[in-house]
Image (cartoon, rainbow, N blue to C red):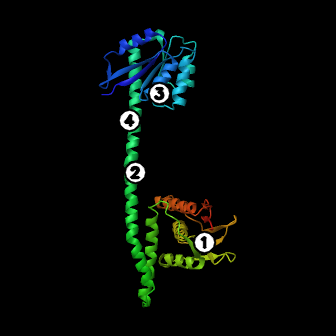
Amino acid sequence: MNPWKVLVVDDEEGIHGITRMIFRGYEFEQRPIELISAMSGAEARKLLSEHPDIALALLDVVMENDDEGLQLVEYIRNQLNNRDIRVILRTGHPGYAPESQVIVNYDINDYLSKAELSASRLLTSVVVALRSFRDIKNARLQATQSDRTAEPAEQRLLTIARQLNQQITPILKQSQRLQQMELNPVASDLATVLHAQHQRLHNGITMLDISDQPAKTGPVALASLMDEILLTFLPQSRRDGWLLDYRIDNTLPAQINTDQVRIRQLLITAIELAILQANSADLKVSLQPASRPGQLLLSVSLTDGQPVFSSSQWTQQLQSHLQLLCQQLQGELAEMDESGTINCQIQLL
């Protein structure tokens, strides 16, 4: 078993001898205690660098300087940034470092006066410190293991999302082709509903894969895009009895240059989020120039009534995905106001 490393820092050789005698043959949790001796603060700094796994430091306060031990505490905590090692101060000159001030002002774990220190008291303090060090290390180990467990889970989810995307993409293409065929009115309506459901399912699966895919920049006809988006939500709006409409500002060009895939995803996601808050109220999508030159403002708002804000996991996922899409389109998602309006500002390329 690896020993517990205890650093003893004191400029009196006798203190090192007494400490070695007290801990000779002593074990804690079947692990021996290895004492590492330093006669000065400078030597202690060197040993701390050589032995990063030191569990406990027993520090004298007064050595080459009246506050050398306190300077060592600052070095350990602030320069080495070591919060795990336990620190016990031992002093034969309590007047130089009063206990009440030191405990408050320095990150130490115990304060011992050499004049009142017995072997039993020292053993007790060391065991308590080692137990605390053990618990800290165990907690860190468990956190690391949890992170390692989470990583494969996230990777599995990403793999599943990509597999689902591969499966839904050809289905989406087939339902799109089905709409272009000469069908009777009933079959045509069914094809429209099927394609709309495929579109929304595809967008939902896309949210599971947050990897930054290359942009597919090109011209986008705004009216055609919005007609397609309306058809995507037409089956639900008919079933639930609400309307979805859009308005394109007449100062906007008929075509804009942007990421063709992400702007479609952004609109679908924003409307999905608005539907959750609308409580079956009518919705309107507005496209207009943003206050900043070269940017487009997309807004989804209720035409009547008050929104019903939700904090469900699905709502949070939609908000998170919407924010990511805005960032990928070099824009931003504005916080929703009391009216529940969703404002997305994106860069035109």
Q: CA distance from mark 3 to mark 4?
A: 22 Å
Residue placed most toward the observer, 252 or 212: 212
> What kind of element bears circle 1?
strand
| x then y, percent, for residue 226 | 57, 76
Residue placed most toward the observer, 42 or 173: 42
Which quadrant holds the N terminus? Answer: top left
Residue 135: which quarter of the image? top left
Q: Residues within 10 Å of mark 4 (few under 14, many from 20)?
A: few
Q: Are marks 1 and 2 in contact (CB under 8 Å)?
A: no
Disc 4 residue type?
Asn
Q: Is residue 116 visible?
A: yes
Of the image marks 2 and 4, the number of the one nearer the N terminus: 4
Q: Are marks 3 and 4 in contact (CB under 8 Å)?
A: no
Of the image marks 3 and 4, the number of the one nearer the N terminus: 3
Residue at image mark 1:
257
Of the image marks 1 and 2, the number of the one nearer the N terminus: 2
The circle drawn on residue 138 is 4
Residue placed most toward the observer, 336 or 69: 69
In this rendering, which labeled residue sits more in front, label 1 or label 4? 1
Kindly identify the residue that appears in the image at 44 percent across and 29 percent down.
Answer: 52
Disc 1 residue type?
Asn
Residue 109 position (above or below residue 330): above
Residue 104: which quarter of the image? top right
Of the image marks 3 and 1, the number of the one nearer the N terminus: 3
Q: Are marks 2 and 4 in contact (CB under 8 Å)?
A: no
Kindly identify the residue that appears in the image at 44 percent across and 27 percent down.
Answer: 50
Residue at image mark 2:
151
Residue at image mark 3:
49
